[in-house]
Amino acid sequence: MVSSVGTALLGKTEVVRLALVALLCEGHILLEDVPGTGKTTLARALAAGVQGRWRRIQFTPDLLPSDVTGVTVFNQATREFEFHQGPIFANVVVADEINRASPKTQSALLEVMEEGAVTVDGHRHGVDTPFLVVATQNPVEMSGTYRLPEAQLDRFLMRLTVGYADPAAELAIIRGDRLVSPDSLTTHTDAERIARSRAAARRAHVDDTVYEYVLRLAHTTRAHDALSVGLSTRATVAMAEAMRMLALTSGRPYVTPEDVQTLARPVWAHRLVLSPEASVGGRTGIDVLEEILDGTPTPQPGGPGATANR
């Protein structure tokens, strides 16, 4: 799957690997970067790799919540109200430029991202499984954008940055060498295989020292002077699921502290809320997270009491 998606997005193997870990966890992904770096290409390639329905929603300032979830209409022939599904009813939903929609429309995704269902006119409608939202947004200040609220950011398992391609990959892109359209990619997995992968990941061995390491990092964020809001319990549970899947996709039946360090930035950084002083000082969530990782001893497999510097 990494190789296949990599034919559509050259030179971004590590980002693709993390995105596929999130996909196998059935966790939502936020792709954040400046325009023109391949965010939508990666989102479409991920969708093409999963057997099932996928839909793309182009978020705009005039998009309404009903344009996402669906609407109930009156059928004059049957004289009954019928629910017409919106594009959110798919296995993979690509929410392109999500920060261009109004907060009211953004909030239409909150329920479905957390519970896998949509409530319209008092009636609850379940979506397909697996269900995955791959959202893209531009972090730069641009006219007509709306910042995602913290409650919605917390629903994303990972926030990934594609970044600019290295010179060799960018040259190949300019020439058009080896580039494949996301729509022509081969399907590699389906709902059954994803469910089996999740079951296999749950059997990965996690030593108590690794769980304690995750807990120490989370507790440190809650008491840090540069943070107004630290990591929630949802964030630690998300880390536990992601680190087991990362170990599985790396060919290991056990989780290491290095898995936690690899995933800390994509899984945790977007969940942190900076204090006003830290924000004015130009610090970011990643800066604070790096400081916490550097200051927290890394557990060693030798025993519960054995520690070493990172």
Image (cartoon, rainbow, N blue to C red):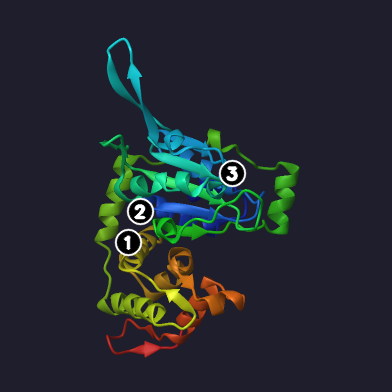
Residue labelled with disc 3:
8
Identify the secondary structure beneath mark 3: loop
Q: SS class of the residue under badge 1?
A: helix
Q: How busy is the neighbourhood of tag 2: few (under 14 within 10 Å), some, or many (20 plus)? A: many
Question: Which residue is at a point 29% across and 58% down the rendered structure image?
Answer: 201
Residue 241 numbered tag:
1
Q: Is residue 52 visible from the viewing direction of this image?
A: no
Q: Residue at x 40, y 86 (%)?
A: 297
> Relative to the observer, which residue lies in front, 260 or 289?
289
- Say whether disc 1 or disc 2 marks the residue closer to the N-terminus: 2
Q: Position of residue 25 (x, y in %)?
A: 35, 53
127 or 249, which lies in front?
127
Amino acid at dot 1: Glu
| Residue 25, numbered label | 2
Which quadrant of the figure has residue 192? top left
Distance Cα–Cα, label 3 vs label 1? 28 Å
Viewer-nearest residue: 261 or 287: 287
Image marks 1 and 2: residues in contact by CB distance under 8 Å = yes
Q: Residues within 10 Å of mark 1 (few under 14, many from 20)?
A: some
**CA separation, marks 3 and 2?**
22 Å
Name the side, left or right, on which 290 lies relative to 142.
Answer: left
Q: Secondary structure at mark 2?
A: loop
Identity of the amino acid at label 3? Ala
Q: Residues within 10 Å of mark 3 (few under 14, many from 20)?
A: many
Residue 93: x percent and y percent? Answer: 44, 40
Report, in whole angstroms, how far the alpha carbon at label 1 lies from the one at label 2.
Answer: 7 Å
Closer to the chain start, of discs 3 and 2, is 3
Residue 250 placement (x, y as % from top left):
41, 61
